[in-house]
Image (cartoon, rainbow, N blue to C red):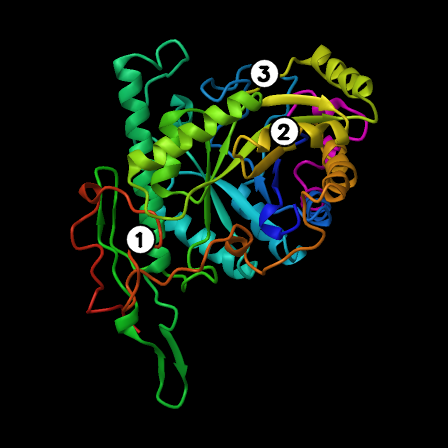
Amino acid sequence: MSTSDSYLHLAVALDGAGWHPAAWREPGARPGELFTAGYWADLARTAERGLLDLLTVEDALGLQSGDHLTPAGRDTGRVQGRLDAQLVAAFLAPLTSSIGLVPTVTTTHTEPFHVASAISTLDHDSHGRAGWRVQTSFRADEAAHFGRRDIPVITRENRDTPAGRALVAELFDEAADAVETVRRLWDSWEDDAEIRDAATGRFLDRDKVHHVDVRTPYFAVRGPAIVPRPPQGQPLVVSLAHGYDPALLAARVGDVVFTTPHDADDAARVVAQVRTAERAAGRTAPPLKILGDVVVVLGGTDSQARDRLARLDANIPLSSDAAVLATTPAGLADTLLDWRRAGLDGFRLRPAVLPTDLTAIVDGLVPELQRRGAFRTAYTGTTLRERFGLARPLSRYAAGADPAAVPAISPSAISPNSDSPNTAGATA
């Protein structure tokens, strides 16, 4: 492996004190600083020192629990509460220079107009390093925070019933509509819409600012956006897929998909599932980049790593959708490169304990991968899209734009005139 195209993509998922529920009790953890700006700045700077592609910031609309379908109970042994992911990313933008910043934003109860404004602003603040991790909410207690809709209680037992499957399909359809609406709002200002000509008194070319006129079963958005077009044109859209339905969502509207393989054979199955979803969605955009999620517990020896995990589990056992790898940096490199042969483009690493395992990733895993020619030795490109080999698309409303430049959803969910530029424009 000798070219930059052969390098692994590496991302890190930041969540509280780490992905193990007992992480906050570990030596080196900083539980008293979880809600401070300095804590998140230190994590981001460490991740950037390791040349990682991007960091994601976890978020949700309810307190943490041991299961994404289950409301938080009276369990006082795990971290509860978190800072807003969008605002954390915005704070980190001027404190970093190269790493991608990808907050989690839930589509189910969040207005697409607000999301478009926030992520576009983050892209301006970071000079083209913003992304959006799309997430849906299946929890009835989260719906109760807003009072706009009722979501029945979904459990692992009733999720596979006709009613459960119908709700899942509805929430994923809504998410696809939300992402497509946000993408249209990002495109609603053409790149040269701002004239800024003091001599003529014209700041804006109103013919280059467009209504999007979205009408879906879930919301209606007139547009245009209030934030000028993002530096990337289309900030990176990512999501997590545990199965076919979320893989189909990613295929419809995403750029990168996180998956949860548990071994090399499972990685091959996951890659095949994503490619099947792309064909089913009629995807015309570039193929999804597929990253595998793994929880990492690192030590100087395999025995030390396993002892760390056992100590953590003795407090609160970890229940994880992703594989848990307790090993050395060299052992982790072996596993990642083995799984990569199945067709994965890289990995999103979930440090079990922060900052301990993030530091081990940066100071142990990254140099090991570099020695093997599998990871970059310096950042290249200036935007997050460039890092993933994605061109900057024209606004879909601009003359000569390629409508296939970004993923599109079924036109039945979007008003038939929404692809047509608004000739009336917006008020200058």
Quadrant placement of the C terminus:
bottom left
Q: Write down the region rendered in magenta.
A: 19-40
Frontmost of labels 2 and 3 is: 2
Q: Quadrant of residue 251?
A: top left
Q: Position of residue 254 (x, y in %)?
A: 41, 43
Query: First in sequence: mark 2 or mark 3?
Result: 3
Q: Which residue is mark 2?
A: 338
Q: Which residue is mark 3?
A: 319
Disc 1 + disc 2, Cβ < 8 Å: no
Q: Is residue 297 magenta?
A: no
Q: Position of residue 258 (x, y in %)?
A: 50, 34
For badge 1, the amino acid type reads Ala
Frontmost of labels 3 and 1 is: 1
Q: Which residue is mark 1?
A: 404
Query: First in sequence: mark 3 or mark 1?
Result: 3
For badge 2, the amino acid type reads Asp
Q: Quadrant of residue 372?
A: top right
